[in-house]
Image (spheres, rainbow, N blue to C red):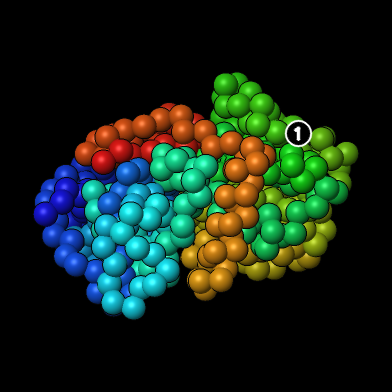
Amino acid sequence: MVKAIRIHAYGGPEEMRWEDVTVGEPGPGEVRVRNHAVGLNYIDTYHRTGYYKLPSLPAVLGMEGAGEVVAVGAGVTEFKPGDRVAYANPPGAYTEERLISAGRIVALPDNVDYKTAAAMMLQGMTVRYLFRETYAVKPSTVMLFHAAAGGVGLIACQWARHIGATLIATAGSPEKMEMARAHGATHVINYRTEDFVARVKEITGGAGCDVVYDAVGKDTFPGSLDCLKPRGLWVSFGGSSGSVPPFDIGMLSAKGSLYATRPTLMTYTASRADLVATASELFDMVGRGIVRINVNQTYPLHAAADAHRDLQARKTTGSTVLLP
């Protein structure tokens, strides 16, 4: 038996229970991992509430973690007990130990500690696919990035600075604005006190942005579309304020023949080759000090419900790690 955070019904943080679970031995192609650190992500709240349905209930929450392999199943040749590994999918990370497919974990470089790895896998690989594949960011790129003081946002600010792109950030307080600026944001907008659409037009001289990265959802729609150049791309990759409401696709033509996409990390890392390539570039960026991972909050794993409350109340900045 090990301890884990499980939900038996969808709902608020009060549904999260710290309880005994049976892990078992790894089957063919599986490994058993002892987590040393577990990442907290907004998608965890979507799973908890049922906004994104889990395969079945009861279920262990959590998408990412880092730890050591303690056992391997038949046919596993890439990993052995004692190996340091990290992962960002599938769910089931809020636990002391878990089973996971060997195809979904990656070897952790010696220069990345467990806490950093648990804080960076999902968020860092998200930035990598957003900047490399969803839209190929170049030095000439002008982008708007919402919620730039969060875990994904601070990584994006640093990555964009390295590329040489112009990143216009939104944040909800002077402190968060300064944090985004310190991490590489070219311009920062306080979305609570400023009209972000008007400010983007002012900053860009009326030209607008090539791409808008939007994980906020309801509260920034359709304003995000109004920040784009003709034929610009709106990337909706989350909904921290709620779902984007249904809209007439004709809105995209009326606002300048715009493109829209709703990507997920799971699709972009579905193959083993894509997962390894994405993780490898992230490890390289962190290893060279180009991207620094900010673990600004830690909670005991058994207090994960408190972490969820603080995350949804926008009390956190950067990355948060849960410690078993």
Q: Secondary structure at mark 1?
A: loop
Identify the residue at horizontal 22%, vertical 39% (top origin). Answer: 302
What residue is shown at x 38% (from left), y 55% (from top)? 83
Near-viewer residue (176 or 98)? 98
Residue 189's quadrant in the figure? Answer: top right
Point out residue 105 in the picture as x, y percentages from the top left corner: 42, 62
In this view, 84 is above or below 24: above
Vertical relation: 79 (above or below) 2: below
* Amino acid on which disc 1 is placed: Thr
Q: Residue at x 76, y 54 (%)?
A: 137
Extreme residue toward the top, this view: 174
Vertical position of residue 161 compared to residue 66: above or below: above
Q: Nearer the viewer, residue 297 or 31?
A: 31
Q: Is residue 231 left or right of residue 320?
A: right
User: Is residue 31 visible in this depiction of the protein?
Assistant: yes
**Quarter containing the C terminus:** top left
Q: Mark 1 highlights which residue?
A: 186
Is residue 44 depicted above or below 59 in this figure? Answer: above
Residue 307 lies, in percent from the top left, at 33, 36
Task: Specify whether residue 309 is in view.
Answer: no
Query: Local crowd at mark 1 within 10 Å, few (<14), some, or many (≥20)?
Result: some
Residue 94 percent location from the top left of the image:
28, 49
Task: State the residue at coordinates (23%, 48%).
Answer: 96
Give how far across and how far down residue 246 sits, in percent: 53, 63
